[in-house]
Amino acid sequence: MTDQTDMKIGREDFEALIKGEKTIAPYIELDPLAGAYSVFGVKTASNPNYMVKAIYEMYEANLNKKLAVKAVRKLFRSVGAGSVGLNNLLKKLGMNLKPEEFLMLVFKLQHQQGWGAPFELVSASEKRIVIRTKHTFESQVLKDWNMAVCGLHQGWIEGVLTSVTGKTWFCLEKTCHAKGDEYCEFVADRVPASWKFRAEAVVKGDASITEFIEHKPIEGKITLMEEPVVMMPRFIFTSMTNSLKKTMGEAPASGVNYRAYKDMGKENVEHYRKMSIFFDLSRTKLDADLTELHKRFTAFGAPSITGGKLAYGNHVVNDNFEVVDSIEKEKGSKATVFQKIGDKAIRISTNVVTAEGKRAVGTELIKVVYDAVITKGQTYYGTADVVGQKMVVAYEPIKNDAGEIIGILFVGTPEDKVLGLSMEGIKKIKPQTLSDMAFAFYAQMGWFNFVKEEWDEKTKTKTITLSHTVESESFGNIGKNVCYCTAGLLAGIIEGAFGIRVDAKETKCKSKGDEHCVFTITSKKD
């Protein structure tokens, strides 16, 4: 066994590893008695194939295959984020690798530890990196799943890139060895962690809605893209419908269901419209303010901790309000600088004034933001109550020349200002985009499955064919049409997206013995 206590690794070793002139083998230490496995003296996971398969199958047994891939992806995102330690070591050795170079190094080391086939870089830009491999270890052991299974690597890639860039990355597996494809190919995009991006990914088919569903059983909540949603189990759906029928009769109950779900469809489209514009404008404003705040401070020099205080060059930030006040005067935005002191982030310069009329210096940043920005090195976006005013906010890590996080820059703008701007931009969203978005969401949440959508120009009729609906599956073959809720939902989506009044009618139904549930949508006659 190699004695690593006397073994040091330097820049020349890493350069040789990157060039392929050396392998990682001399730096791996196995201690079977202690059950330990370390690389460069750091304990790591050996994860043989059987263990990977066991993890997937454990999740699959309690969820399903798609959610199992999602769960593993989320788990290994944090594993990838742990690569920040290796990146910091490289920086101390004077090696500032590009994100794609660092990612390829991580997977080169992984391959040399026996984790799958070698990776190759397909393409790279500031906002997109594409890599591929003949197979991953999960695509080998889960071939019988016959689907894209590499959630482990998707999460790992996201974690690695996010940790070294401080930006949010979203990775998709475009092809997979377990599906019979030649390569497992991964496309990683640097993206705004916004509702809008996620929605667009679902509509384009680049992502599944299940990736953004969070189950919180202890809190009794389910959220979709961080928004609370109602999931309608079939037994609840049938119970509610049958209760209405007993109370008021079948025809009135069907009418109530139609109108209720029509209203829900319209409300959801309006929500998608507002949220899409709101997040787009929020990020544009916040990113511009962060860039300006960063620019004004770095004009003084590089950030550092000098004499226990945070400084840019010779410009000490503590209790100096010149820059933050200029941001408020010229941009109308709140601005704050936090200094990392121990395991806390403390406000040292701010234009935020308390109810008592004093600047909010000396106060501590909340833990959830601290964990995201200081611990994980991410830029955090959200909403916050700032001295009684609802604001959209952003927090960005301040890093010194060694890449260490020493503080945080904060900007915030009143939420009502962004909402005002968003209302002006609402008409710019194409109606077809909104309806496609709503149809995709409901389909992936299990309400129905699309077969086709047709338009008859002569009769001005839209025909939508579904392979099943939640009603047809709930009631089974009972010899009559049952999909009044779905008809209302489809009508509401069309009305909300296109701003027209329509009627929707089910002409064929699986519960009547037809092959599909078919709906016609026509302009409503006043």
Image: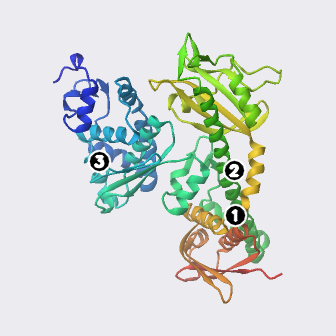
Q: Residue furthest front?
A: 299
Provide residue 58's location: percent of width, then percent of height.
Answer: 39, 47
Q: Earlier in the sequence, mark 1 or mark 2?
A: 1
Q: Are marks 1 and 2 in contact (CB under 8 Å)?
A: no
Disc 2 marks a residue whose amino acid type is Phe
Q: Earlier in the sequence, mark 3 or mark 1?
A: 3
Provide residue 27's location: percent of width, then percent of height.
Answer: 23, 27
In the drawing, what numbered circle is on residue 94?
none
- Secondary structure under tag 2 reads helix
Provide residue 287's location: percent of width, then percent of height.
Answer: 62, 41
- Secondary structure under tag 1 reads helix
What is the CA distance from the residue labelled 1 to the residue labelled 2? Answer: 35 Å
In the image, residue 183 above or below residue 243: above
Q: Quadrant of the C terminus?
A: bottom right
Q: Residue 323: name its quadrant.
A: top right
State which mark lies toward you, 1 or 2: 2
Disc 1 marks a residue whose amino acid type is Met
In the drawing, what numbered circle is on residue 278?
2
In the drawing, what numbered circle is on residue 119?
3
Disc 3 marks a residue whose amino acid type is Phe
Residue denoted by label 1: 240
Which is more toward the observer, 286 or 85?
286
Q: Left of 25 or right of it: where is 421?
A: right
